[in-house]
Image: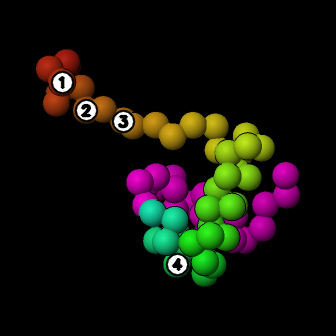
Amino acid sequence: MELDRIDLKILSAVQRNNRQTTEELGQLAGISPTACQRRLKQLRQTGVIEADVAIVSPEAVGRS
């Protein structure tokens, strides 16, 4: 898949915070929420986005 500047803006934004809405991501990338959702789906289907993960604080769950 060839990435354009909009895809790169979306990827940059989801790397910082993957809990943003498609409306918020679309605003950052300069596209509509529908177009953003379509691009996110394609990025996931083609393996550009491999997974959405949560980083858990060890201290918060009683681990060192």
- Identify the residue shown where x is 57% and y is 72%: 33
Q: First in sequence: mark 2 or mark 4?
A: 4
Q: Looking at the picture, tell me which residue is in the foreground, 63 or 48.
A: 48
Q: First in sequence: mark 3 or mark 4?
A: 4
Amino acid on which the number 2 mark rests in the picture:
Ser
- Identify the residue shown where x is 45% and y is 63%: 21
The kind of secondary structure element at disc 4 is: helix
Residue 35 % position (x, y): 67, 70
Mark 4 — residue?
Answer: 27
60 up-or-down from 33: above or below: above
Discs 1/4, front: 4
Q: Would you identify the image quadrant in which residue 4 lies? A: bottom right
46 up-or-down from 57: above or below: below
Mark 2 — residue?
Answer: 57
Magenta segment boundaries in residue numbering: 1-20
Mark 3 — residue?
Answer: 55
Discs 3/4, front: 4
Q: Residues within 10 Å of mark 2 (few under 14, many from 20)?
A: few
Q: Looking at the picture, tell me which residue is in the foreground, 26 or 4.
A: 26
Contact, CB < 8 Å: mark 1 with mark 2?
yes
